[in-house]
Image: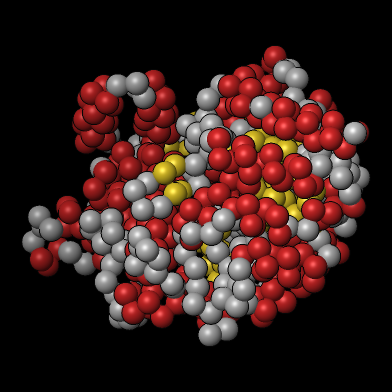
């Protein structure tokens, strides 16, 4: 499934997250990179250097928007100012799809700026799906939701995380940004099989995949995006690609960011798996 | 427990200030035991208690917002010193948690909050003073308070100027053809005009320059911090008029004459060009014959910088 209605039937390959330390390199050296993912909130401004940089990137590269604060899962209503600014940015970037997280992070207008895990309840699934639909209808672009990594589980949960993800995307009829690193991190923190999760995801809804590195502590793993991708995550990625097919893949590296070439080189390792998936599909 | 209730409980715990040890406190701000809250809401696992799992989010929240606050206000940190800055940051972020989807707005209420809480900036100084001299009004007149407030205003102006909108500029020939009694000019949305008691622009530039050049050496950074503290102690109040503006999308601090500032401020408040010039030179010591040439030179500069829009 290289292209589907959740990624506007595009066939993107491997991209990386657009980050400030790489701006000069990208704009002066113009390296080959199939696409960039931008953090929407960094560009939801009225002017200045952020938009100047973005316009230069847009002139040369394909760009997809990824948000961090829509909080589909917050019980409160959507922030209209946020949506208005996001729509302006969608018009500017012409992003083929827009992703944000299956999480919550704001209460009564106060923002934690974190990706807090959902209680896996039917009430939460209903509220979350409703908000995803509202965002999609307002922005007029396919919306895909990303599974987050988590460090806590709630007593009130009525299902597993993957069952909750499926419940939400079916109700909202939206796509999935499958983050295989997040699946791995949560599986280690909550003692479940990451393969069970990957195998349970509806393949036809996966619009994009995230890969990343993380940090291991004595009692838990933190999703820090500051290391290369480890082998168990590549194995999960391999399994995901076998199920889903050739899918737009993005490496996230957000802290202790090495050179553009190093990040891009790490991301391009995904091509090995994508190539074998394409070969398998051809056979 | 429904979704809204659960999220309120968790958010209250996550946003509870950390203990001095940087661990989660035993009780939340409303006096509830956080161990009980955690046990009621969060499952333990074979390695972590419910409290420890909640604590991960509590610590991440505070580390994130404090990092963001420090990045936005390095000048205030230099004025106050690390320990006082840390206390101010925690008190401010507890009273004024983010109400925006973007961390960029974290400091948007800092100036108004500090005006209501002068003791936050001056308590270490006030503690040394006689008790009768510690009223809020007295604290607000303290030089350290004024210096800190000036720095906050400058740093927030810099944040706003960086990514505010720009409109198509009006050129000089349009200005020259217009009737000054009727012409009303708008300043670019990104321009911020500041009347300051201290020349904090020089200080902030020095701090940023040094922060940028000494990252490789802790010893150098510490030495520079001590230099900054002594520079702060030597800093005398000098009325400073400033335009924080952009050129080629870089932010600059441009010093203004008092009269220049007066004209620009009057234009910003919607006065006609003629009235704005009158307001700018009110109580000015500039000889009348020099006023016209000064005004003409200033407008040439402002127009060249693209500061006016219609």
Residue B11 appears in the picture as rendered: yes
Q: Position of residue B112 (x, y in %)?
A: 44, 61
Task: Using residue A163 as the reference point, say whether residue A56 is left or right of it.
Answer: right
Q: Residue furthest front?
A: A283
Question: Residue B51: where, in percent of width, then height?
Answer: 34, 68
Of the pair B34 and B121, the residue shown nearer to us: B34
Q: Position of residue A170 (x, y in %)?
A: 80, 68
Q: Is residue A108 above or below residue B220?
A: below
**Numbered marks: total:** 0
- Most extreme residue toward the top is A29
Give the quarter of the figure containing the C terminus of chain B: top right
Identified at 48% across, 59% down, the residue is A191
Q: Which quadrant of the figure has residue B127?
A: bottom left
Residue B245 seen: no
Q: Residue at x 21, y 67 (%)?
A: B135
The residue located at (69%, 64%) in the rendering is A165
- Front residue of B201/A184: it is A184
- In the figure, is residue B279 to the left or right of A5? left
State the image quarter where residue A140 is shown. Answer: bottom right
Q: Residue at x 62, y 19 (%)?
A: A261
Q: How is the image coloured?
A: secondary structure
Q: Quadrant of residue A260?
A: top right
Please state the horizontal and vertical placement of residue B308, each as a whole percent of the image: 72, 38
Classify residue B55 as left or right of residue A230. Answer: left
Foreground residue among B215 and A260: A260
| In the depicted structure, whether residue A40 falls above or below residue A50 | below
């Amino acid at each position: 499934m290289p292209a589907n209605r959740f990624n506007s039937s595009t066939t993107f390959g491997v991209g990386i997250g657009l980050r400030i330390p790489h701006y000069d390199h990208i704009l002066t050296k113009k390296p080959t990179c199939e696409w960039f993912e931008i953090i929407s909130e960094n560009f939801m401004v009225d002017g200045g250097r952020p938009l100047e940089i973005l316009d230069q990137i847009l002139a040369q590269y394909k760009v997809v928007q990824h948000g961090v604060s829509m909080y589909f899962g917050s019980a409160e209503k959507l922030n209209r100012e946020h949506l208005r600014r996001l729509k302006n940015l969608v018009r500017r970037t012409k992003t083929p799809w827009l992703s944000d997280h299956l999480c919550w992070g704001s209460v009564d207008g106060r923002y934690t700026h974190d990706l807090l895990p959902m209680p896996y309840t039917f009430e939460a699934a209903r509220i979350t799906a409703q908000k995803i639909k509202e965002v999609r209808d307002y922005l007029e672009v396919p919306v895909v939701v990303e599974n987050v990594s988590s460090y806590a589980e709630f007593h009130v949960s009525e299902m597993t995380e993957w069952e909750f993800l499926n419940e939400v995307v079916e109700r909202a009829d939206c796509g999935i940004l499958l983050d295989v690193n997040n699946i791995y991190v949560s599986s280690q923190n909550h003692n479940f099989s990451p393969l069970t999760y990957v195998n349970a995801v509806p393949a036809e809804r996966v619009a994009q995949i995230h890969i990343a590195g993380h940090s291991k502590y004595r009692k838990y793993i933190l999703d820090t995006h500051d290391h290369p991708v480890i082998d168990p995550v590549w194995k999960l990625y391999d399994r995901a690609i076998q199920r889903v097919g050739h899918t737009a893949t993005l490496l996230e590296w957000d802290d202790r960011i090495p050179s553009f070439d190093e990040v891009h080189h790490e991301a391009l390792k995904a091509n090995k798996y994508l190539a074998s998936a394409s070969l398998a599909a051809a056979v | 427990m429904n979704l809204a209730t659960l999220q309120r409980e968790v958010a209250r715990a996550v946003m509870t200030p950390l203990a001095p040890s940087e661990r989660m406190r035993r009780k939340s701000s409303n006096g509830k035991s956080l161990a009980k809250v955690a046990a009621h809401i969060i499952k333990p696992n074979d390695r972590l208690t419910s409290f420890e799992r909640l604590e991960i989010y509590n610590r991440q929240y505070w580390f994130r917002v404090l990092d963001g606050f420090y990045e936005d206000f390095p000048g205030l940190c230099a004025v106050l010193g690390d320990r006082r800055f840390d206390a101010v940051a925690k008190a401010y972020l507890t009273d004024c948690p983010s109400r925006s989807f973007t961390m960029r707005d974290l400091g948007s209420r800092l100036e108004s909050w500090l005006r209501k809480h002068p003791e936050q900036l001056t308590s270490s100084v006030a503690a040394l003073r006689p008790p009768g001299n510690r009223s809020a009004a007295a604290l607000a007149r303290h030089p350290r308070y004024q210096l800190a407030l000036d720095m906050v205003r400058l740093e927030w102006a810099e944040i706003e100027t960086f990514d505010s909108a720009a409109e198509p500029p009006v050129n000089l020939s349009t200005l020259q053809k217009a009737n000054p009694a009727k012409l009303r000019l708008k300043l670019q949305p990104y321009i911020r005009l500041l009347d300051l008691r201290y020349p904090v622009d020089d200080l902030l530039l020095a701090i940023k320059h040094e922060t940028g050049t000494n990252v490789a050496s802790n010893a150098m950074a510490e030495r520079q911090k001590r230099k900054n503290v002594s520079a702060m102690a030597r800093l005398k109040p000098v009325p400073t008029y400033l335009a924080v503006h952009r050129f080629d999308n870089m932010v600059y601090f441009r010093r203004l004459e008092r009269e220049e500032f007066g004209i620009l401020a009057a234009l910003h408040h919607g006065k006609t060009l003629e009235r704005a010039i009158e307001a700018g030179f009110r109580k000015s010591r500039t000889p009348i014959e020099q006023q016209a040439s000064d005004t003409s030179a200033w407008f040439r500069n402002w127009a060249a910088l693209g500061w006016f829009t219609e």
